[in-house]
Amino acid sequence: MMKIKRVIYNNKLFTVVLLTYIVLTALIPGKAVQAFQNSLYYVKEMLMIMPVILLLTSLITAWVPRKAIEDNFGKGSGIKGSILSFLLGSFSAGPIYAAFPVCKALLAKGASISNIVVILSTWAVIKVPMLVNEAKFLSPKFMIIRWILTTISIFLLGFIMSKMIKKEDLPQEKSNDHEEKGGIHLSQEYCIGCGLCAKIAPDYFELINKRAIVKNAFIKDGEEIIVRDVIGKCPAKVISTT
């Protein structure tokens, strides 16, 4: 009984949806069938799109250096970051829910709140393929005016949200996803488990469950060069010193 309660608690949303279907089936069978068909359509769509999105987020987290994200999408990227975020959202593919894992990966790598808002907003309302269809059905003039006003609103929204929401306000990863001790910092969430750090500096790193951990964060005198060598050779760029 306790096991069933635990499963229900850990899957609250799914339980609510399942109960809703049961109630609909009992009271309005026709609507229940229609709702199930609609849900099945979206599930199929997700199964086609999400593997590609998960592959993209894996590439971002594992292979794109944090500095590259910070320079191009971070708080100090300025107008360049806003433009790149706008272009990324505009030329994206897939429904808006596909943008959430991508944006989470970018945010974890150093992207700013304002640029994340720009990516999400452009992804949702001004993607290029959508603009073509909008011009076809509602006229080019309608599309251009809406595009201009929407673009202004998006950048304004990004600025306002960056002032109202800080990264500390967002859900944080569990503490065991990061190993930070003293002078050496290792982001386990993005570790690809190559084991290179443990081979080069076994006194400071070891591999457990295909993830590197920091054995000793305090660098001994004269061994700074070893740690710097590890940082430079880490393919995922997840090691740094504080």
Image (cartoon, rainbow, N blue to C red):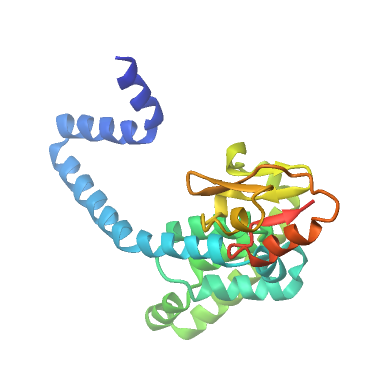
Residue 208 image offset from top left, x and y in percent? 52, 43
Q: 105 or 169, which lies in front?
A: 105
Residue 233 image offset from top left, x and y in percent? 64, 66
Image quadrant in which the N terminus is located: top left
Q: Residue at x 71, y 76 (%)?
A: 80
Answer whether residue 174 is visible to the viewer in this image: no
- Residue 227 image-quadrant placement: bottom right
Residue extending farthest to the right is 221
* Rendered view: 7 above or below 29: above
Answer whether residue 76 is visible to the viewer in this image: yes
- Residue 214 image-quadrant placement: top right
Q: Residue at x 59, y 56 (%)?
A: 199
Residue 141 image offset from top left, x and y in percent? 51, 84
* Rendered view: 219 above or below 231: above
In the image: residue 4, left or right of residue 132? left
Q: Residue at x 77, y 54 (%)?
A: 241
Q: Residue at x 33, y 31 (%)?
A: 16
Q: 235 or 109, which lies in front?
A: 235
* Rendered view: 209 above or below 111: above
Q: How many marks?
A: 0
Q: 172 or 233, which lies in front?
A: 233
